Image (cartoon, rainbow, N blue to C red):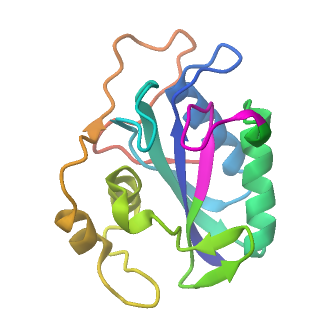
């Protein structure tokens, strides 16, 4: 089994669930795919690439996975689709109910059509690195061995902030806050 890290993002409600609730819903389903599944705290960040949309809620999930990278990709795309993601109708870097990226798959370097791991823009994205480091503080980039903490510290400020709910969830959903790690 390999340790995998997934990056989760959402900035559009779906079926009555807010973006943070969608992240929790995805975590619940991912917990059935991954052993020892853990969810990072949730962060908010301004959108990248397309600015005329709501801020994103981001988190990371880690756990052990027994299948291959292609199988995991298919599984996370099914989780996205069940929460309203339709890749055919969205604009690149636009709003979405749920986006799940495979950030790491063990120490593997994968370059296949439709699948690049580590995620090709991981080094540029504080909103992915910070929750990854909440879960695996000593994580290093496969291939180079460079500490992801060092990479994060070298990035310019990207405005990532700990998620702070304005009100309690109506459904009693507990959303991880800064310093919290949720286990399945």
Residue 94 sits inside the magenta stretch: yes
Question: Between 171 and 111, which is closer to the camera in this rendering?
Answer: 111
Residue 56 percent across, percent down from the top left: 44, 34
Q: Residue at x 28, y 45 (%)?
A: 179
Helix, strand or loop for the magenta stretch, by majority: loop
Compared with residue 96, is residue 156 higher up or lower down, i.e. above or below? Answer: below
Residue 6 percent across, percent down from the top left: 56, 58
Quarter of the N terminus within the rendering = bottom right
Q: Which residues are magenta?
A: 89-101
Compared with residue 89, is residue 60 higher up or lower down, i.e. above or below? Answer: below
Instruction: Classify residue 123 as left or right of residue 28.
Output: left
Q: Residue at x 51, y 69 (%)?
A: 120
Find residue 112 and report its image quarter: bottom right
Residue 52 percent across, percent down from the top left: 44, 25
Residue 180 sits inside the magenta stretch: no
Question: Between 100 and 25, which is closer to the camera in this rendering?
Answer: 100
Find residue 44 and report its image quarter: top left
Find residue 96 and report its image quarter: top right
Q: Residue at x 22, y 73 (%)?
A: 150
């Amino acid at each position: 089994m390999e340790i995998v890290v997934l990056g989760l993002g959402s900035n559009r409600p779906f079926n009555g669930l807010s973006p943070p609730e969608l992240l929790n819903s995805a975590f619940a389903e991912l917990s059935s795919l991954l052993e020892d599944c853990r969810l990072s705290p949730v962060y908010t960040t301004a959108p990248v690439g397309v600015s005329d949309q709501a801020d994103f809620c981001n988190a990371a999930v880690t756990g052990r996975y027994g299948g291959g990278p292609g199988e995991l990709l298919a599984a996370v795309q099914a989780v996205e689709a069940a929460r309203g993601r339709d890749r055919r109708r969205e604009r690149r870097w636009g709003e979405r109910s749920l986006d799940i990226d495979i950030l790491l798959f063990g120490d593997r370097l994968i370059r296949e059509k439709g699948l690049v791991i580590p995620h090709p823009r991981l080094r540029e994205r504080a909103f992915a690195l910070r929750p990854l480091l909440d879960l695996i503080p000593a994580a290093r980039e496969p291939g180079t061995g460079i500490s992801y903490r060092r990479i994060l510290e070298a990035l310019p400020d990207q405005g990532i902030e700990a998620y702070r709910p304005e009100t309690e969830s109506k459904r009693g959903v507990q959303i991880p806050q800064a310093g919290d790690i949720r286990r399945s």
